[in-house]
Amino acid sequence: MTKLKWGMIGGGEGSQIGPAHRLGAQADGLFEFVAGALDHRPEAGRDYARRLGIADDRAYGDWREMLEGERGRDDRVDLVTVATPNATHFEITKAFLEAGFHVLCEKPMTMSVEEGEEIVRVARASGKILAVNYAYSAYPMVREARAMVRAGEIGKVRLVVTNFSHGHHGDATDADNPRVRWRYDPAMAGVSGQFADCGIHALHMASFICDDEVRSLSADFASTIPSRELEDDAMVNFRMEGGTVGRLWTSSVAIGRQHGFDIQVFGETGGLRWASEQPNQLYYTPVGGRTQIIEKGEAGLSDEAARLSRVPIAHPEGFPLAVANIYVDLADAIRGATRDGLPGAEDGLRSMAAVHTAVASARAGGAWMDARPPMFRT
Amino acid sequence: MTKLKWGMIGGGEGSQIGPAHRLGAQADGLFEFVAGALDHRPEAGRDYARRLGIADDRAYGDWREMLEGERGRDDRVDLVTVATPNATHFEITKAFLEAGFHVLCEKPMTMSVEEGEEIVRVARASGKILAVNYAYSAYPMVREARAMVRAGEIGKVRLVVTNFSHGHHGDATDADNPRVRWRYDPAMAGVSGQFADCGIHALHMASFICDDEVRSLSADFASTIPSRELEDDAMVNFRMEGGTVGRLWTSSVAIGRQHGFDIQVFGETGGLRWASEQPNQLYYTPVGGRTQIIEKGEAGLSDEAARLSRVPIAHPEGFPLAVANIYVDLADAIRGATRDGLPGAEDGLRSMAAVHTAVASARAGGAWMDARPPMFRT
Amino acid sequence: MTKLKWGMIGGGEGSQIGPAHRLGAQADGLFEFVAGALDHRPEAGRDYARRLGIADDRAYGDWREMLEGERGRDDRVDLVTVATPNATHFEITKAFLEAGFHVLCEKPMTMSVEEGEEIVRVARASGKILAVNYAYSAYPMVREARAMVRAGEIGKVRLVVTNFSHGHHGDATDADNPRVRWRYDPAMAGVSGQFADCGIHALHMASFICDDEVRSLSADFASTIPSRELEDDAMVNFRMEGGTVGRLWTSSVAIGRQHGFDIQVFGETGGLRWASEQPNQLYYTPVGGRTQIIEKGEAGLSDEAARLSRVPIAHPEGFPLAVANIYVDLADAIRGATRDGLPGAEDGLRSMAAVHTAVASARAGGAWMDARPPMFRT
Amino acid sequence: MTKLKWGMIGGGEGSQIGPAHRLGAQADGLFEFVAGALDHRPEAGRDYARRLGIADDRAYGDWREMLEGERGRDDRVDLVTVATPNATHFEITKAFLEAGFHVLCEKPMTMSVEEGEEIVRVARASGKILAVNYAYSAYPMVREARAMVRAGEIGKVRLVVTNFSHGHHGDATDADNPRVRWRYDPAMAGVSGQFADCGIHALHMASFICDDEVRSLSADFASTIPSRELEDDAMVNFRMEGGTVGRLWTSSVAIGRQHGFDIQVFGETGGLRWASEQPNQLYYTPVGGRTQIIEKGEAGLSDEAARLSRVPIAHPEGFPLAVANIYVDLADAIRGATRDGLPGAEDGLRSMAAVHTAVASARAGGAWMDARPPMFRT
């Protein structure tokens, strides 16, 4: 099977996200890295691309140059990953979709709901794949959880409780560090801090596993470090279309939590529990029964869980391979397979609608508000 | 040291709470069990009391008979435990306080805020001890957590997050079982179901460890089993007097959680984490540092933690001995020591105010409301 | 039901073991503490006994005085607990048995195999109960494990692996502390250090859960702190009568392990795992299936597990109540019930035989040796 | 930086080990997969190689053909991975080393001690790198443990305790399954079953972290499923050159253990604990202090830990990336860097000596024997 051709925008030298995508795209031998516009400084980007083995003529200085360079080639890239600063995702993603490329966009897909709706329209019109990198949803045991919910193994879902809380921004003496500060500055981060950064991963996962969408929400935001304009701690209560009650806590000042992203799903006939720090186990309790530990790689798992793990039971697989699983699904989808686990434009749009609704609700003292994008309120 | 004399009202044969109190009172040899009105059926209560070794003349038929019998004796009981149905706590507690007895009352102390304020006034006037059995607060490592907060070891507390969620009422096919049903029926349980049952333990613990009180709250209640009138799942956001942000989730439909009562406290310079299912460890993370496991019984703990444990490090002590610790503190307090860890009438009152405020807030779509008892709003 | 009468020898002021036994005997209201010879200093012992509420005439100066005092009384004690220094257990236990008292002896029951055999003979002849305080075996979930093995739920047991390792004697700078040093000095501790102190708890539990006895063993001893004459670390491989392979590691220099006593039992159709630091859960894996978490207090447990727990599921019960469970069984047995979970003279003897065999094997370079007491080699 | 050229022998379609190596070699973009002799069936191997993107002329039918084909090329492979059946490792590895290729050999490196000594000699003479795939030693937190030991952070190591026990061969009804059976058949597996399969990973890790070598050992082997000729459970006690006491348990019938590979290292001033199922945390306890949780990716780790992790703190990395770390070190070493964490020929030889010594000791009733390869007994 010939490798697909892949290019990246952003993810330059020293970024965290660049290596994760390169590993994700290449780990399984599915994509060949052939083009890139890796840095906002054209020469630095070209130089880094060359050092990563990109041919001279595909080591681009910026995304527009790359768009022009690639659109005319016979051997043009099959997939473009957009890993640039958040405010630029919309423009780049839109342009590449319109030029007929498949795109994987980092989250958040856009900064506004209106932009999100535009991407949905463009993606639909283009017939191309637009995926958003909600990579946690590609862990095998998260896929297993969704498969179990879909199969009715816990009955109708009554309640979903999810947290994404860490303490890495909890040091007030470090709050002015540029690495930290921008996230709480509306000029750079937009309307929301921690909820837009981590909360939407949790909200997406709630929708993903429950196979349902958020309809309304009520939010409480706090800036526990007073110099921050945007929230560093948030609680969002929500209701899903099917009636499921949701509770989501996210924080960046939870000192001692390292990567506290976990989810619990409670249905009429059972409960599920999963935590991102130990991603290879899923805890399942049938109503009236004992808690069981489901292991990645055990016999009898769903196809979604089985095809996305690489090594035998109890050999752990971690976050970089969850990112790789997004690329596995993308490669399959580009070749025509149905991969409905891939988060897409509609997911990216719903996240934006949730962010803006949560901000408004928090400002209105926790009032319940419709969290659906206008285009989905039918 | 002579044993103190102890009597109990309620806790008859087959009750869960009776054995816990008898064990708690007697385990350390501090109290002698000499009087009781153990059952709402006079003869059954007298008979059971006799079988437990109570002398004939102190095996009472009801609490009024016990009040009359004991008040006149030279060797009257030093302490009365009230473990009757919730709606009777107020009347019995008030009567014994007024007659000059020390009282340990099961939670909830009262059903209404007005009754709670009355107990506060009566307790103050009596000069007697009125304790409420928030027994979790007497675990050694919970006391250690409070001592650490008081000593400033995590700095000013920014955030407290606590859960008390289980799944033991999650089986809809069992929802009409009388053992379960009454908790969700306003005629028997009052205005609140799960929040009044378990949530107030968590709310008390938040106040206890943070050494602060709830000022306002916003609540979201749900009856996930539709036949229930009262809530079986609740989320309460709150603010404390000192500005601390609070988040409290409580549920009885969280299938797979057995006794999911835990608390996390995040301050300016550190975080703490404790869970009731593994009560002998406290997790502490200084800002910028590694998580440390503090063990019950290790050298150098606070006096509050040290004096309330009985066996060496890593020999677990469980819930019955947390109840016993309430009795240890009561024995000390009766003999004149200062035991400010003992939950008292004001704590019982604040719980009631929180319950009624949460109910009102949930009905008002999560509106923020003052959660303080009227008598404390100065 | 009238309380039984109980006396204790040893366990004086400041001892760790005294409070554990007093709590154990009194927690459930089954025994009344009426007599004691609590200290090797007669006046100190009498004084302490009085302060604990013992009548003057039963506050004895030494065990012989107590034996004389009690044997003639109509209301003599039903049960005597022997919690004196190890080397005196044999003499005291023997004397009280011969005088017709039931006895609970702390471990080790004796210092030599010959003494152990003598106790077995005396106990058999007396018709009285002689129990040895292997209290861990009285945890509800340990009883459940034994019940499951007996019921064939894991099939024939192939393998048992148990550890009892801590690090509390791992500080060489503290090795000369008298509290620590005596355990490694043959003049005080006898032939073995850590194996005799902790290892025999693990070996007893292996026999207890597997419902089988050790037949032969091979040992490797080490004194990792060179100034120690006796071992502070030991590995013992063994074979049981039914062919089960056994592995036992015990250490007192395992810095970071607090109370690392755990056991794993592997049979033809399943495996079990239990750890003393989280004693309320038992992990069970059927062959080819998922690991299940069995909770103390869940529905459907064996009678042995159910009758020895006091509070509902997931309310932890700890070590002091395991000791109390020994007293529950003793009270029942004294009243005539069959309580075959009570460790007895034969268990105490087998422990001694194992200790002496392990010492000999370690000296002989790990040679396999018959570990049975001579009187059981038929 | 140009990619290095890589080829593989073995690891054909359907094998578990092939994908792990391909992912390991390619994940970080360090190696280009250009040649292979992937199957013992020449045509199947050529065909699979082509499907994986290997050019026709480097899709070889067997290893000899590959050796001939590659040795004459200017662009010959820089590294050959040998992932063929165990009995062939020696011959192939030797041939490629002699032809001047760097080699990564799967474990066991050889079947006999004599072969192992030959590989050591050949590797030394060749000046080429011979690495053995003890991949667990390349987990970042294992490297951190070794760095801590080397830096003296736990003082002189007294004791190391390691287990590698699973239950995946515990089903007697599946024991004749060819996938399982060959491991216990001397005709296919050689002199040892479970110890040679898993035990040597644990023994290597003990040496690796302690930075010391095994000098002598005593073994106890058991075939708990009687139809097995070779052991499915083994206990090995050992002593290291520096005096460290070692204990190693390995089992394949430990039903309920999934991948129970863990290690504890106890020194004069501290203890360390690591488990392969949660590989991103290392537990460290200073003597007299509290246990601390060291997280992969935290600030201040050793260079060995820091350079081998890819994603931020608490984003787990798993087994495939530990394999990739072996390739990271190989790429560095091929380019001239010193990478003394790479397991080499001497490690492979020592494993073989330990296997044969353990077999002999077990047959001799656990007699202590010199476990060093003859060539290292100086």
Image (spheres, coloured by chain):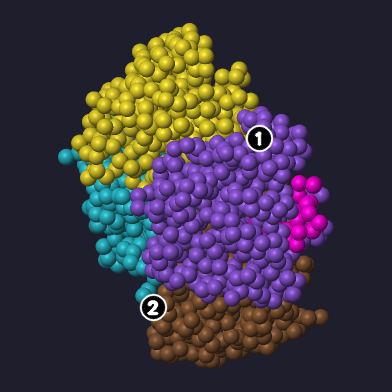
Chain colours: A brown, B purple, C yellow, D cyan
- What is the number of callouts on the image? 2
Q: Residue furthest left?
A: D378
Whether residue D318 is situated above or below residue A180 in the rendered picture: above
What secondary structure is found at the residue carrying circle 2?
helix
- Is B184 within the magenta? yes
The chain letter under disc 2 is A
Q: Are marks 2 and 1 on the same chain?
A: no
Give the x, y percent position of residue D70: 38, 61
Residue at 52% over, 85% down: A229
- Horizontally, residue B260 falls left or right of residue B41, namely left
Front in this rendered view, residue B224 or D121: B224
Residue at 29% over, 32% down: C183
- Is B87 within the magenta? no
What secondary structure is found at the residue carrying circle 1?
helix
**Overall secondary structure of the magenta section:** helix
- Horizontally, residue D96 falls left or right of residue C215, namely left
Badge 2, how many Cα within 10 Å: few under 14, some, many 20+?
Answer: few
As shown in the figure, which amino acid type bears the numbered disc 1?
A: Arg
Rounded to the nearest angstrom, the CA distance separating label 2 from label 1 is 64 Å
In the drawing, what numbered circle is on residue B58?
Answer: 1
Q: Is residue D101 visible?
A: yes
As shown in the figure, which amino acid type bears the numbered disc 2?
A: Thr
> Circle 2 sits on which residue?
A173
The chain letter under disc 1 is B
Q: Tell me where residue A353 sits by quadrant.
A: bottom right
Front in this rendered view, residue D325 or A50: D325
Whether residue A225 is situated above or below residue D355 in the rendered picture: below
Q: Tell me where residue D128 sits by quadrant.
A: bottom left
Considering the image in quadrants, where does the C terminus of chain C appear? top left
- What's drawn in magenta, residue-wise? B177-199
Give the x, y percent position of residue B217: 64, 72
Q: Tell me whether circle 2 and circle 1 mark residues in contact (CB < 8 Å).
A: no
